[in-house]
Image (spheres, rainbow, N blue to C red):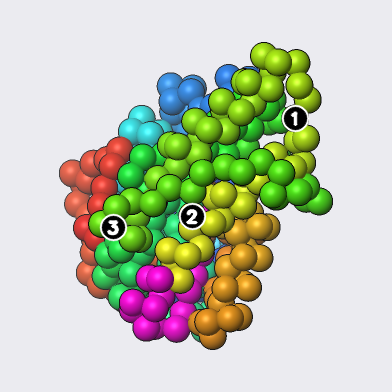
Amino acid sequence: MNILAIESSCDDTAAAVVRDGRTVLSSCVSSQIEMHSIYGGVVPEIASRKHVEAVSGLADKAVSDAGLTKADLDAVAVTYAPGLIGAVLVGVNFAKGAALALDLPLIPVHHVRGHIAANYITHPDLEPPFVCLCVSGGTTAIVDVRSYTSMAVLGSTRDDAAGECFDKVARVLGIGYPGGGPMDRLAQGGDDQAYPLPVAHVSGAELDMSFSGLKTASLNLIHNAQQKGEALDLPAFAASFGKAVSDSLIPRVMAAARQTGYGKIAVAGGVAANRRIRADLQAACTQSGDRLFLPELCWCGDNAAMIGCQGFFEFQAGHLAGWDLNAYATRDIALG
């Protein structure tokens, strides 16, 4: 089954063709990072306009790169939630038009479910059930993946997402946007004990997280040093920040793994590319005996291949949309 997939939930326009949920025939991404970096973050109105400009040509390229014609397509899948509402609407409306014109089924895909499905591309042997740590600029959650389409959130952040904290801190340091990559590179070789930073605990909800305190403490530390004219040891600070994020995530996902007893842990989302988090999870899984599944770095960020992959399983479960499909800024992953 060949699925044309569209992703436009934030600042990347993406199109891909995926066969049978595991094989990526093509994957095309048009990034807006250079434009939004001027502002230190995504400007929603600009992102939406750029999606409009890029999506049609990118879809044509995805079909061509796959070595197919439009007649070879069997369905159209699209991210319909969550994300920047204007950006998501562009992808949804294009996908509805494409499915209508080609007389194909329309498959709605939850963005975070797509990130989880990126692991199926890297690991063809991975099957539910498993626990997945989803960490990105907009989401930080521990998900019980009971089946390909039945999921429940076991724990999540009460405020900021981990990726958002990386972005905000990197912006204040002036090292680039998005912040995850620059912070990761800066942290290499740094002393992660140099700057003690807080790791929050949510009383009565052991699997929930909070990153607002870490963000505030980090920004205060940077501003105080600037006001006093003191130089920060940037590699040490980045390493200390990465350690604080990891120390918040790893114990909770390991606790979730013990609760479920699946013996399998996966990671998904842009922050899944962070070297400290990947290394700490590998060390924890080596100690616990759980199998760890990490997506290839190319599938950690937003892409349409992951949407096509999850779209295949949503199709098999009969989860199709009509022409009244709408976009949503927020949506519970359990609802699909």
Q: Can residue 72 be seen in this view?
A: no
Query: Which residue is denoted by mark 1 in the rendering?
Result: 232
* 3 in the magenta segment: no
Side of 221 where 16 appears, left or right: left
Magenta span of residues: 255-270
Determine which residue is flagged by label 2: 248
Question: At 38% across and 34% down in the image, what residue appears?
Answer: 84
Amino acid, disc 3 = Ala
Is residue 262 rendered magenta in the image?
yes
Circle 1 crowding by C-alpha within 10 Å: few under 14, some 14–19, many from 20: some
- In the rendered structure, which disc, 3 or 1, sits on the residue that comes first in sequence? 3
Mark 2 residue element: helix
In this view, the residue in front, 11 or 238, is 238
Q: Which of 273 and 157 is in front in this view?
A: 157
Using the image, determine if residue 208 lies above or below residue 149.
above
* 3 or 2: tag closer to the N-terminus: 3
Q: Which amino acid does label 1 sit on?
A: Leu
Q: Are marks 1 and 2 in contact (CB under 8 Å)?
A: no
Residue under label 3, please give it: 205
Label 1's element? loop
Residue at horizontal 33%, vertical 51%?
A: 202
